[in-house]
Image (cartoon, grey):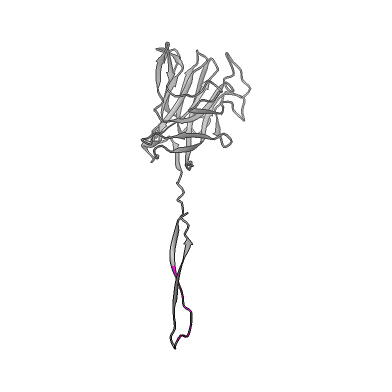
Amino acid sequence: MKKKTVSVVLATSLMLGGAFTTFTATQPVEAKTEQKVAQPIVLEDTFNQGSNGWSGSFSDYPVGSEEFYELSYSLKHLPANLDSKQKALFLGGNNHSDDLFMYVTKPVHMTHKVKPNTTYKVDFDFDIATNEAADSFGIGGSPASSLHVKVGASIVKPKTYVKEGYNRLNIDHGDQKNDGKNAILVGDLGKLHTADDSYEIKNFKHESKPFYIKSDSKGQLWLIVGTDSGYEGITKYYIPRIKAVLTEVPSK
């Protein structure tokens, strides 16, 4: 707390030989310094006009097996039973390895000012169009509850590298339903309202499970949204909306 010294004039009427005598004194007065609250970084993306900086990719599958795994990422219209005029990020794959990770990622620092060496609390609020019934079952696991939805962030661009004949991700996204340093579990692809094979919009949030990330010395951060599969079969889903709020955590 800073202190300022101000002068206080005490005019005392003392009649000394017909004249007034003025006494001046000083005393310390505390002045409060207001701290500015940093405004959060807010991203809210829909995809009718394009991908808005998001890109899709895959990991945890054998090298050279992209066609066999039927890997597909593109910008597509939502299924006919939903709003077919609305576009979304589409991800699809046929998981033969029981461990396929499908994801989209975006560099926040390319569109927003991220402070260097700063810790942020990241809150996601997004939708996925899924056609997997909650009580379904299949090879290796359920196509619904074994499709683990994850969100997170990293200070390096998420990309694959080759290790022992497999394409692996260069960040720690965990293993299936288990959290990693760079990604946490927020739900699964099981539908809430219908049991047929039609698509349904499912919302994901994680207020009770905060995620924190510290930016690097250049103020770089990449967001990530994806699924870690324990189901050996075909998965296809759409992401029509992603919102993320990055709130600066005051340093101690």
Which of the pair 9/109 is nearer the observer? 9
Residue 113, by quadrant, is: top left
Kindly identify the residue that appears in the image at 39 percent across and 27 percent down.
157
Kindly identify the residue that appears in the image at 44 percent across and 39 percent down.
43
Quick check: 44 above or below 98? below
Residue 41, percent from left and from top: 44, 42
Residue pushed farthest front? 17
Q: Which secondary structure is most common in the magenta stretch? A: loop
Kindly identify the residue that appears in the image at 44 percent across and 18 percent down.
168
Residue pushed farthest top? 165
Which of the pair 62/113 is nearer the observer? 113
Residue 104, percent from left and from top: 44, 28
Residue pushed farthest bottom? 18
Which of the pair 125/82 is nearer the observer? 125
**248 horizontally vs 195: left or right:** left
Q: Is residue 221 magenta?
A: no
Residue 127, percent from left and from top: 52, 33
Residue 158, by quadrant, is: top left
**170 horizontally vs 211: left or right:** left
Which of the pair 157/98 is nearer the observer? 157
- From which residue to which does the magenta span run? 7-16
Count of residue discs: 0
Residue pushed farthest right? 135
Q: Is residue 12 magenta?
A: yes
Residue 149, percent from left and from top: 53, 27
